[in-house]
Image (cartoon, rainbow, N blue to C red):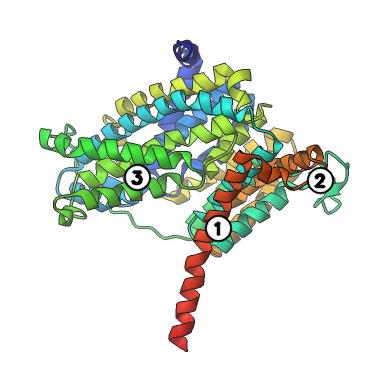
């Protein structure tokens, strides 16, 4: 009964004319940037983050969330029609989706991707409504020690599960935490890592770091890539899948939804891992695995469902615990902080209209995606022909305008340029920037809860293991680090033996 009351409140917020407009704008823009390779939700949200400062919190979060899960949908269009994923999570869709398109079955491939996406999105949103409140109620009972251990575990998970080595992931997270600690220490009043610059007294603004690290650096990287796209210029017809297509797809859709829903809750796993895990499972369960890679519709249905389910359930730890499960979720937490809302379980109690309005808008947004995208396939095909060099000046201009309007400070643009250069160096060194932004956001919170726990326990470190929950979180973090380190040690040992 209480859930029904909350959902009634949420739909009352989401169905207001302005919030419907924000939701429509979000999913439309999300699909657009998902279709365009080189422009992802991370860059788009980083650019638009400062521009949402003047919007009401509910409208800002509804629009930014729509961009996020809209891009997860739009990436499949590019993967199927161009063999080029608009999003990394859509990379596996290229394998069979593009082959279906070359066989003249682009319509059924796009339709199954849409059906799987909307089913997974709705189920994922339902999980948020059911799992969010009890998880938030438990989190409200956390003390400083539990929060420290939880955030530390989230940071380790995010660092260990990114592409590349564990050392690079941990190093990026540590660097992000150092930059996050820059500014005036609230306890002692001492300036830290400011290098005598008055502009850093309050630390680096989150908008500056996000825009520089993702928008500016991505522009430079993409300008250096020469990409020739083979766009299917034929008319996409027969969007309705056959009965055989639906019969072959409904089980992969449900399995993909389950995989994506589980992995989406875990920090650091992401949509890409969910989609690849779903593809591997479908290929293993198939009666004829040789069909995969040659246009098997199950290779589209499962991964796309997993991708969108993970996109929805990413919001569970973000909204209920204040723990971002990905870099994009970290940007959405930054949007809350811009509006003066402290992320965490108290969001559901102190701002119920925000939480439940966002949940209700996700159902509305997923329906909008299907209604919008299938009739507009021809429009997305036309957008695929737009060269990236025509887009980057607009991205750069909007980024600079947004950065300047937050604090009316020209130095913020210079700082953003610095982080853009830093992000470019990271990418050239094959270092993922996601752990950096998570470390930047979580670092100060980890330090604050560590110091608070130390004050409460009079400096006794046993407080972190005397609490069962805190001990479990630390054990998971330690276990994950061991699991990542052991294969590296074994590999080096085998190499040494071979050389010997």
**Relative to 396, is 29 above or below?**
above
**Which mark sits nearer the N-terminus, 2 or 1?**
2
Could you tell me which residue is drawn at 61 percent across and 56 percent down? 172
Quadrant for the N terminus, please: top left
The answer to whether marks 1 and 3 mark residues whose Cβ atoms lie closer than 8 Å is no
**Which mark sits nearer the N-terminus, 1 or 3?**
3
Q: Nearer the viewer, residue 340 or 402?
A: 340
Q: Position of residue 186 (x, y in %)?
A: 83, 38
* Mark 3 surroundings: few (<14), some (14-19) or many (≥20) residues within 10 A: many
Could you tell me which residue is drawn at 21 percent across and 35 percent down? 250
Q: Position of residue 112 (x, y in %)?
A: 23, 36
Secondary structure at numbered mark 3: loop
Q: Quick check: 482 left or right of 336? A: left
The residue lying furthest to the bottom in this view is 500
**Relative to 163, is 242 above or below?**
above
**Which mark sits nearer the N-terminus, 2 or 3?**
3
The answer to whether marks 2 and 3 mark residues whose Cβ atoms lie closer than 8 Å is no
Q: Quick check: 276 left or right of 58? A: left
Q: Is residue 305 visible?
A: no
Q: Which residue is mark 3?
A: 384
Q: Is residue 364 visible?
A: yes
Could you tell me which residue is drawn at 53 percent across and 64 percent down? 485
Q: Which disc is residue 481 wearing?
A: 1
**Relative to 489, is 363 above or below?**
above
Q: Position of residue 191 (x, y in %)?
A: 85, 47
Secondary structure at numbered mark 1: helix
* Mark 2 surroundings: few (<14), some (14-19) or many (≥20) residues within 10 A: few
Q: Given this view, does label 2 or label 3 mark the residue nearer the observer?
A: 2
Q: Nearer the viewer, residue 436 or 250?
A: 250
Could you tell me which residue is drawn at 35 percent across and 46 percent down? 275
Q: Which residue is mark 2?
A: 459
* Mark 1 surroundings: few (<14), some (14-19) or many (≥20) residues within 10 A: some
């Amino acid at each position: 009964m209480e859930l029904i009351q909350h959902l009634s409140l949420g739909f009352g917020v989401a169905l207001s004319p302005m919030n419907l407009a924000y939701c429509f704008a979000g999913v439309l823009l999300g699909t657009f940037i998902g279709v365009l390779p080189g422009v992802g939700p991370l860059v788009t949200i980083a650019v638009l983050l400062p521009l949402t400062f003047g919007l009401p919190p509910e409208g800002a979060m509804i629009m930014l969330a729509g961009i996020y899960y809209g891009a997860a949908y739009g990436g499949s269009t590019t993967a199927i029609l161009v063999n080029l994923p608009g999003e990394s999570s859509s990379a596996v869709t290229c394998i069979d989706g593009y082959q279906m398109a070359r066989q003249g079955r682009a319509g059924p491939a796009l339709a199954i991707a849409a059906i799987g996406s909307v089913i997974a999105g709705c189920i994922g949103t339902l999980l948020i409504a059911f799992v969010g409140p009890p998880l938030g109620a438990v989190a409200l009972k956390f003390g400083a020690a539990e929060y420290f251990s939880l955030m530390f575990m989230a940071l380790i998970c995010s660092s260990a599960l990114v592409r590349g080595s564990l050392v690079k992931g941990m190093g990026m997270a540590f660097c992000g935490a150092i930059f996050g600690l820059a500014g005036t220490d609230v306890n002692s009043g001492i300036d830290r890592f400011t290098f005598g610059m008055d502009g850093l007294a309050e630390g680096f603004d989150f908008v500056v770091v996000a825009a520089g690290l993702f928008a500016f650096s991505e522009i430079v990287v993409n300008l250096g890539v020469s990409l020739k796209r083979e766009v299917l210029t034929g008319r996409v017809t027969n969007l309705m899948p056959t009965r055989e297509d639906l019969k072959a797809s409904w089980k992969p859709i449900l399995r993909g939804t389950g995989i994506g829903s589980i992995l989406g809750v875990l920090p650091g796993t992401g949509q890409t891992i969910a989609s690849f895990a779903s593809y591997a499972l479908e290929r293993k369960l198939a009666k004829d695995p040789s069909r995969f890679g040659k246009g098997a519709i199950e290779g589209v249905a499962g991964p796309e469902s997993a991708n969108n389910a993970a996109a929805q359930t990413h919001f569970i730890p973000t909204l209920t615990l204040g723990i971002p499960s990905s870099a994009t979720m970290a940007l959405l937490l930054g949007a809350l902080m811009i509006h003066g809302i402290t992320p965490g379980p108290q969001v559901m109690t102190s701002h119920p209209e925000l939480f439940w309005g966002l949940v209700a808008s996700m159902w509305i947004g997923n329906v909008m995606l299907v209604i919008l995208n299938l009739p507009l396939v021809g429009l997305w095909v036309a957008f695929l022909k737009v060269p990236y060099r025509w887009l980057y000046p607009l991205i750069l201009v909007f980024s600079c305008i947004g950065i300047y309007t937050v604090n009316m400070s020209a130095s913020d643009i210079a700082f953003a340029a610095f982080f853009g250069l830093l992000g470019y160096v990271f990418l050239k060194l094959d270092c993922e920037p996601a752990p950096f932004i998570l470390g930047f956001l979580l670092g100060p919170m980890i330090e604050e809860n560590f110091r608070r726990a130390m004050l409460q326990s009079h400096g006794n470190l046993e407080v972190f293991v005397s609490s069962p929950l805190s001990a479990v979180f630390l054990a998971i973090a330690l276990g994950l680090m061991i699991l990542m380190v052991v294969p590296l040690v074994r590999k080096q040992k085998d190499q040494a033996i071979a050389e010997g």
